[in-house]
Image (cartoon, rainbow, N blue to C red):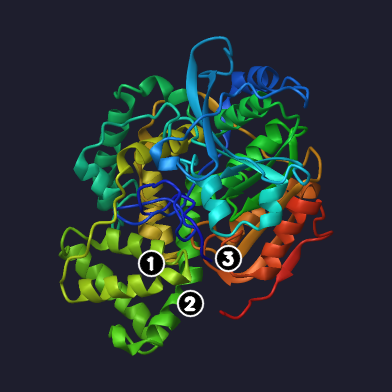
Amino acid sequence: MSGPPNADIGPSSERAAQPRPHRGRKWPRSKTLALTLAVVAVAASAVAGASAATTDVPTDRASSLKWGSCPKEAAAPRMECATLQVPLDYARPDGRQIEMAVSRLASENPSKRRGVLFTNPGGPGAAGLSYPAVLAAFGLPKEVVDSYDLIGFDPRGAGRSSPVSCDLTPEQQERGAFPTYARTAADVTREARYARTVARQCAGSHSAWMLPHTTTANTARDMDRVRAALGERRISYLGASYGTSLGAVYATLFPKRGDRIVLDSNLGPRGYDVGAFRLVARGMEERFPEFAAFVAGHPEYGLGTTPAQVTGKFYELARRLDEEPVGGVDGSMFRGRTLDGLYADMLWPDVAKTWQALDLGKPIPPAAPPNAASSMAARLYVLCADTRWPTKIRDYQRDAAVDRLLYPMLGGSTANIGPCAFWPDTSQSPVKIGSRGPSNILMVQNERDPGTPLLGAKRLRWALGHRAAMVTADEGGHGVYPFGRNTCANDAVTAFLTTGVRPAHDKACATEPVK
């Protein structure tokens, strides 16, 4: 797969969407990887918020948004931006309001325009204000761009939408938001001390008042407020990685508000919970053989001439860097950077060169993005508030021991303890994804996706029942539409968005040769 990052979860800290390969969230000093997260909401808000945010709006009503120029980071030809006040707490819709940043790339062909297409590049914690311009410039077919006004937004807590903070130090930002690789139970206990420190910083920050309210469910409610402000009865949606969780939650809370919903690179029905984090280790194991074959076919890298030798080099480097980091890169960061590089084939040469340098003891450039502090905090706010995480250290010690055996490349990290174990109790209940609602969802998924593995997509497909159809591509990498190379899968999404025609049954697309 290749395309812009979905700022989802993974070893790197998050970064805003830019024209680069579709990826996910960040871990220790890696690029952006996309582990993303779950669906939840305050139990009281689920009813009050749904009723408060779903009032019908006549389609002929003029937009109440005041469009103007976009901030520098989202500026692009024809892009307009606006801000909207939304409730902090949907159980108290007339109470404190927060600001949400919204963007629009209007259709240039009014005769073909059929509505609005909301977009989300992934996360959580990733800004999405510039995403419509990225999509239009780097692959979204013209017939789709003509059919919709493309709508982007920074989710609450991220970018310019009331950004949150954890008062992270430069060292913490450099370390990233993903746990270190635990080889022993003592490693988990040691990581717990760091995780508790970060959780306390978030709870003591100047934005701690947003802790209970920075959730996927509330972001979905914010989206519906934008829908109403646009004067639209229904919205179409294109969300990738964590964006699939957001889309599934919106479709659950507002089943009559969705038009054509596309979920690309799917999390399970519980979003980015503890299980989704652990599943990433499986995703790495499923994807890595393709990278190993590539490196073995390029002996100039000096990392092995067979996939088995390349795999052995991975474990050798990880052990060496655990014992003696090179230029600040330890074994955990090395694993994270490797995982990041599995998101798209086009990243493989850079990953191989990184291995080369570390093998020779040479430092490599840092990978943390300029906005790592705010995106990492926003990610934690959502991850930890969306679902309940285990709170006992022994549970993580057990899980890390199991996953080290099942998925030795990454299992010791993805099953290790993080700040969510020490998060303040916000008494929230997850939004239960189910099959009630119209059959208007198209899921698209690579079979060997390292960030959102196929197993999670199958679980979401089962939960959605008749509401969804799923197209799987016999490809590796994170993200399918519109940046991937599989024309069978891409054409299915384009047809659905432009004509409403969806495969009558789940569809499997064969692998296609690299052009």
Out of 295 and 487, give the one closest to the viewer. 487
First-in-chain label (1 vs 3): 1
Name which quarter of the figure residue 410 lies in. Answer: bottom left
In the picture provided, is 407 more to the left or to the right than 487? left
Q: Is residue 42 visible?
A: yes
Q: Is residue 177 above or below residue 507?
A: above
Name the quadrant of the C terminus: bottom right
In the picture provided, is 125 more to the left or to the right than 442? left
First-in-chain label (2 vs 3): 2
What residue is rendered at 59% in x and 15% in y? 91
Out of 395 and 431, give the one closest to the viewer. 431
Tell us which disc is closer to us: 1 or 3.
3
Q: Residues within 10 Å of mark 1 (few under 14, many from 20)?
A: many
- x and y, in percent, of residue 476 in the image: 54, 69
Q: Is residue 183 visible?
A: no
- Disc 3, SS: loop
Out of 166 and 406, give the one closest to the viewer. 166
- Disc 1, SS: loop
Q: Is residue 256 above or below residue 51?
A: below
Q: Residues within 10 Å of mark 3 (few under 14, many from 20)?
A: many
What residue is rendered at 51% in x and 69% in y? 286
What residue is rendered at 84% in x and 59% in y? 504
Q: Which residue is mark 1?
A: 409
Q: What's under tag 3, amino acid-wise?
A: Gly
Question: Contact (CB < 8 A) between labels 1 and 3?
Answer: no
Tell me, for residue 290, which label it has, or none.
Answer: 2
In the picture provided, is 303 more to the left or to the right than 254? left
Q: Which residue is mark 3?
A: 484
Return the residue found at the far right. Answer: 504
Q: CA distance from mark 2 to mark 1?
A: 15 Å
